[in-house]
């Protein structure tokens, strides 16, 4: 993701009134922070393949999109604000020829919604241009930015992604080759970064030493084999590529005409995949740990039922992310599953907000209840998380107005008590309802008959993997990469600016 860490309030772009970044209108979910895609495929239409890859990764960011291609030493770039289908058309894609492509779809953190921050970031070096797409967040952006500015780097955006690209350029311009320059630059970066880097020679896929954000490798065709990089396996599926393996924590893969070469650039890798990728962020049809995330989400729903069973008439899920866990809860409890809420899937992020009178009249842009299903029923509603509680409160009210006589809320993750600094847009700690309020008091605020969260142990045990291989800092405050106090204060400052 592209994160903004400005040195003063003047560095923050102004937000439009009633923007999606205010607390009232922001989605009450942790929000993902970008999808990356790359392909090395001589003889193929790499721009169009990248377009479809980004289309599959659209859920990871809906604010801007971009593609850079390399035709020899010539770089072709198009990026803009909007969804992938809005940013690109046939004519634009035809003007992006090449054998290498790098793509990005972006969700920005508070205050950084500008076209200049769209990716890929393209920077010139003595060896030619580099195009970089980034998912994650650096935590040392302030000192890194100061270093780059002192060395007269012409930073044009407010993103840490551009800083990584300029750090690479600095190392290469000092005499390093592509591989050496990139590795030296990565050692200057602290935090979460899954990168796809395009050059005239080929593409690189890179993960930070903890592998906090995902990145996978796929193959396309057989003779010759062409390689694809994607944040998730769904980006491979859409173009008919076969999953090969993950890029490992602290690994760099360098894909050229000679094939795929692997380098362990970090000497102390320690896997800490973000557990929210498993619970919520990644698409349910994406594969992690040799199974679809749909299977994991059903499993945590079953565990949730065992931990917090309640007598009711039906189980419903909050579309779409709560549905697999709701089905699992239903299976384990024996309580019938039903659709009680219908989602308008054509509603995206918008700067056009309903008027106060529209809100008061009960405008429902995203979810509408099925009254004949809910009327007179004791309902268990399953969701994946609660951040501030604003959406959950509205959902409960909607269900009661539809005739539900009891509403029991079950959450398929533990209480979110700490902010994320590694590529998820969460609020500061004082805005996280579970950080300051007991479960009993949250239930009263939401006006539910009962509320229960999945246990931390249940969440991790259900992965069937080593619990130590996941980052769950948003639930525990145990950050795998030290977060400087300056960065924590910067996040709080952003919150104050945005309201």
Image (spheres, rainbow, N blue to C red):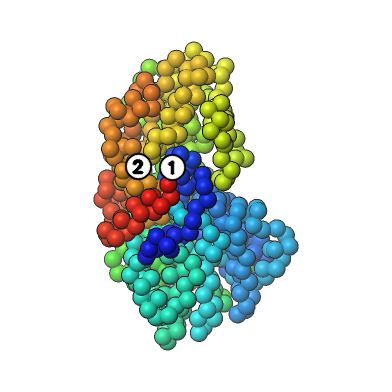
Spatial distance from mark 1 to mark 2, Cα to Cα?
9 Å
Q: Residue at x 42, y 47 (%)?
A: 499
Residue 323 visible in rendering: yes
Q: Residue at x 33, y 30 (%)?
A: 442
Please give left or right for residue 354 compared with residue 177 in the image: right
Q: Residue 185, located in which quarter of the rendered image?
A: bottom left
| x and y, in percent, of residue 39 in the image | 57, 65
Identify the secondary structure beneath mark 1. loop
Query: Foreground: 264 or 90?
Result: 90
Q: Residues within 10 Å of mark 2 (few under 14, many from 20)?
A: some
Q: How many marks?
A: 2
**Decide: marks 1, 2 in contact (CB < 8 A)?**
yes
Specify which label sits upstream in the sequence, 1 or 2: 1
Q: Is residue 431 above or below residue 301?
A: below
Determine which residue is flagged by label 2.
431
Q: Is residue 267 above or below residue 32?
A: below
| x and y, in percent, of residue 97 in the image | 67, 70
Name the residue furthest top: 376
Name the residue furthest right: 91
Q: Residue at x 60, y 40 (%)?
A: 347
Q: Is residue 385 above or below residue 312?
A: below
Q: Residue at x 35, y 27 (%)?
A: 445
| x and y, in percent, of residue 387 in the image | 38, 39
Determine which residue is flagged by label 1.
23
């Amino acid at each position: 993701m592209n994160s903004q860490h400005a040195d003063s309030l003047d560095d923050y772009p102004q937000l439009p009134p009633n923007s999606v970044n205010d607390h009232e209108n922001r989605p009450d979910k942790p929000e993902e922070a970008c999808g990356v895609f790359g392909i090395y495929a001589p003889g193929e239409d790499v721009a169009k393949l990248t377009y479809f890859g980004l289309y599959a990764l659209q859920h990871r960011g809906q604010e801007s999109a971009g593609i850079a291609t390399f035709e020899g030493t010539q770089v072709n770039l198009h990026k803009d604000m909007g969804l992938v289908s809005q940013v690109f058309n046939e004519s634009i894609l035809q003007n992006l020829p090449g054998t290498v492509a790098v793509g990005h779809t972006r969700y920005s953190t508070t205050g950084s919604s500008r076209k200049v921050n769209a990716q890929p970031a393209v920077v010139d070096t003595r060896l030619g241009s580099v195009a970089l797409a980034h998912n994650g967040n650096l935590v040392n952006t302030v000192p890194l930015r100061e270093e780059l500015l002192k060395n007269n780097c012409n930073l044009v955006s407010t993103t840490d992604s551009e800083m990584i690209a300029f750090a690479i350029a600095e190392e290469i311009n000092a005499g390093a080759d592509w591989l050496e320059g990139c590795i030296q630059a990565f050692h200057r970066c602290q935090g979460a970064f899954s990168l796809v880097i395009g050059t005239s020679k080929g593409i690189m896929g890179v993960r930070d030493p903890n592998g906090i954000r995902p990145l996978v490798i796929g193959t396309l065709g057989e003779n010759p084999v062409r390689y694809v990089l994607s944040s998730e396996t769904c980006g491979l599926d859409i173009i008919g590529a076969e999953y090969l393996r993950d890029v490992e924590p602290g690994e760099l893969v360098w894909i050229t005409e000679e094939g795929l070469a692997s380098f362990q650039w970090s000497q102390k890798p320690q896997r800490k995949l973000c557990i929210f990728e498993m619970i919520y962020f990644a698409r349910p049809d994406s594969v992690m740990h040799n199974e679809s995330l749909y299977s994991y989400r059903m499993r945590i729903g079953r565990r949730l039922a065992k931990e917090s069973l309640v007598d009711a008439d039906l189980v419903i899920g909050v579309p779409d992310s709560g549905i697999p866990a709701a089905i699992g809860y239903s299976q384990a409890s024996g309580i019938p599953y039903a659709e009680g809420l219908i989602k308008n899937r054509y509603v995206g992020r918008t700067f056009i907000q309903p008027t106060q009178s529209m809100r008061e009249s009960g405008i429902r842009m995203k979810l509408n209840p099925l009254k004949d299903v809910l009327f007179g029923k004791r309902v268990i509603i399953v969701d994946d998380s609660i951040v501030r509680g604003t959406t959950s409160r509205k959902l409960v009210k909607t269900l009661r107005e539809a005739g539900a006589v009891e509403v029991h809320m079950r959450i398929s993750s533990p209480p979110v008590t700490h902010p994320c600094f590694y590529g998820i847009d969460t609020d500061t700690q004082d805005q996280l309802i579970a950080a300051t309020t007991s479960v009993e008091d949250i239930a009263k605020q939401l006006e539910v008959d009962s509320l229960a969260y999945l246990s931390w142990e249940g969440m991790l045990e259900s992965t069937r993997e080593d619990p130590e291989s996941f980052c769950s800092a948003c639930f525990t405050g145990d950050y795998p990469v030290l977060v400087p106090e300056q960065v924590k204060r910067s996040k709080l400052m952003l919150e104050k600016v945005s309201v």
